[in-house]
Image (cartoon, rainbow, N blue to C red):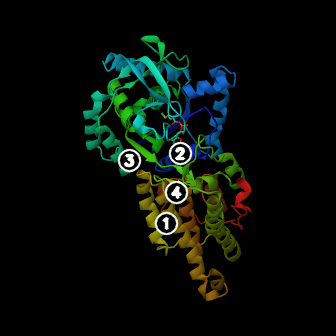
């Protein structure tokens, strides 16, 4: 059985989640559900990054000791996946004992392998990025990502010999052209490596919050190193008494936003090589959700709370909109109007009405029983496209294209209703067979579209299958024509996506 291990970034807990965080979590969940449908053993990891200086500072500002603070706020981060129906397998917190132990072991290995040395460093540190910045990276003296002035830091630290890994990383990139997707991100990472790599400080002195270095407890592990290791540490303690590394490493696919490309595409593989581990299978770097061309972020102050959207439109609609509003991988502007329009136009009208019409016609014209299967469905082409293309598109993380492939089938089904006009066929007894055929094609086509959509719409899909009295077997093998069960007892389905009045409802 093949294995599929996917991760989201572990999010900083210096504030609460916004729609940008939900975005990555939703994408990871859709991919996991889809791979599960293909019969693969899946593992979906998400969690929180708790040892950042900025987390420590927020705790201080609130007059709390950091552990009390992170324990409290971690709860609202655990709500995020639940809110969007992301069915993760493990929620890692970097303050977990199992994680801290593993981090120490991991960097001890790098130390023992001779890739760490002591040096003094002075430079500008952006607490937003939790990284040192060069003058060239600043705009008007500020970090362009966070709009804040970096602080001058001068410390004697332990350094990781990243520069020594340049050749090995280039070889890796050359040998594996799909190591990083999309291609333009691969190129970005590769040219960063080719441009020369600087050693970086792997520890911080004088900061009490973090994982102590095993060989010098006066320093803590640099938060980014601590955080990256989560992808491996989780596998060692997520399931008591089991080491999931045997099954899931190096099968990992890391899903990240473009803000953290270098850490993941350059630092992380180098750290793994230094510690004697295999590098992950693949990284996918997506773009930013923006409002008026500005990244949605806490520091810009233009956040959208996913809770507001889910409470009005439901989690399926938010998930669907997330993959359809912006081509996955690119940056894109999102608006509440676009969510409203997709909800109304695509979910309520295209899909919701199709379910209502199909079930109502089967109820009225055939006493609630799906007619016998037909040999060659008129919808064979769009069905075959779903069966063949959706897995291929999701293999390259093209969630937007996969959703569009399925929607082409949904639209074809609606068109089939309009062109065959079952209500006219029903008036003519001599056309009973034609009506049987159309009703079967609609029910079976809708069943197929629903199974394919179940990764995107995990709440609605079982409802649709239920309305069609079909078994709740989401296996991808069932995405094939003619497998519909000739079920009876079908009545007109209740509306799946009830009317929502104004897009401002969630503002
Ligand atoms: O960087 N559009 O955590 P973080 C799309 N702790 N995605 C967005 C987004 C937006 N506007 N805003 C946030 C960290 N994201 C580190 C990660 S991993 C070892 C450590 C998503 O809380 C996107 O996935 O700043 C981005 O990479 C991530 O949230 C950053 O989350």
Q: CA distance from mark 4 to mark 3?
A: 17 Å
Q: In x, y percent, where is residue 212?
A: 49, 15
Dot 3, crowdedness within 10 Å: few (<14), some or many (≥20)?
some
Q: Position of 506 compared to 418: left or right?
A: right
Q: Position of residue 479 (x, y in %)?
A: 49, 60
> Is disc 3's CB within 8 Å of ligand 1?
no
First-in-chain label (1 vs 3): 3
Q: What secondary structure is found at the residue carrying circle 2?
A: helix
Q: Distance of mark 1 from mark 4, alpha carbons?
A: 31 Å
Q: Is mark 2 within 8 Å of ligand 1?
A: yes
Q: Quadrant of the N terminus?
A: top left
Q: Mark 1 = which residue? A: 481
Q: Is residue 264 above or below residue 326?
A: above
Residue 397 vs residue 286, the one in the foreground: 286
Mark in the foreground, 2 or 4: 4
Q: Are marks 1 and 3 in contact (CB under 8 Å)?
A: no
Residue 122 in sight in this render: yes
């Amino acid at each position: 059985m093949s294995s599929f291990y996917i991760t989201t970034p572990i999010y900083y807990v210096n504030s609460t989640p916004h729609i940008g965080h939900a975005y990555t979590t939703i994408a990871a969940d859709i991919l996991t559900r889809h791979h599960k449908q293909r019969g693969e053993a899946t593992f979906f990891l998400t969690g929180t990054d708790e040892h950042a200086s900025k987390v420590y500072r927020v705790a201080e500002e609130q007059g709390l000791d950091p552990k009390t603070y992170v324990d409290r706020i971690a709860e609202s981060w655990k709500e995020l996946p639940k809110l969007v129906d992301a069915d993760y397998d493990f929620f890692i917190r970097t303050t977990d004992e199992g994680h801290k132990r593993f981090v120490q072991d991991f960097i001890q290995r790098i130390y023992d392998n001779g890739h760490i040395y002591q040096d003094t460093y002075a430079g500008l540190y952006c607490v937003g990025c939790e990284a040192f910045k060069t003058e060239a990276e600043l705009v008007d003296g500020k970090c362009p990502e966070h709009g804040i002035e970096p602080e001058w830091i001068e410390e004697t630290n332990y350094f990781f010999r990243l520069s020594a890994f340049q050749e090995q990383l280039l070889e890796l990139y050359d040998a594996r052209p799909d190591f990083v997707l999309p291609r333009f991100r691969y190129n970005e990472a590769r040219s960063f490596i080719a441009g020369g790599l600087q050693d970086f400080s792997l520890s911080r002195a004088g900061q009490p919050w973090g994982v102590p270095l095993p060989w010098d407890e006066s320093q803590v592990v640099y938060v980014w190193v601590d955080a990256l290791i989560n992808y491996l540490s989780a596998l060692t303690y997520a399931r008591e008494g089991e080491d999931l590394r045997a099954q899931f490493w190096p099968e990992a696919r890391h899903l990240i936003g473009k803000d953290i490309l270098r850490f993941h595409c350059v630092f992380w593989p180098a750290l793994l090589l230094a510690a004697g581990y295999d590098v992950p299978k693949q990284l996918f770097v997506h773009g930013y959700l923006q409002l008026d061309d500005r990244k949605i972020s806490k520091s810009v102050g233009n956040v959208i709370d996913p809770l507001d959207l889910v409470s009005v439109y439901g989690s399926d609609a938010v998930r669907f909109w997330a993959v359809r509003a912006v081509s996955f991988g690119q940056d894109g502007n999102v608006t509440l109007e676009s969510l409203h329009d997709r909800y109304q136009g695509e979910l309520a009208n295209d899909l919701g009405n199709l379910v209502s019409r199909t079930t109502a016609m089967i109820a009225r014209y055939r006493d609630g029983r799906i007619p016998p299967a037909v040999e060659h469905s008129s919808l064979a082409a769009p069905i075959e496209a779903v069966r063949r293309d959706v897995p291929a598109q999701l293999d390259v993380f093209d969630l937007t294209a996969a959703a569009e492939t399925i929607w082409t089938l949904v639209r074809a089904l609606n068109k089939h209703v309009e062109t065959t006009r079952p209500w006219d066929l029903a008036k003519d007894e001599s056309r009973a067979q034609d009506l049987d055929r159309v009703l079967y094609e609609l029910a079976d086509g809708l069943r197929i579209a629903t199974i394919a959509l179940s990764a995107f719409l995990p709440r609605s899909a079982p409802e649709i299958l239920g309305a069609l009295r079909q078994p709740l077997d989401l296996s991808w093998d069932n995405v094939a024509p003619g497998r519909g069960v000739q079920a009876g007892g079908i009545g007109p389905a209740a509306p799946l996506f009830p009317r929502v009045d104004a897009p401002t409802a969630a503002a």
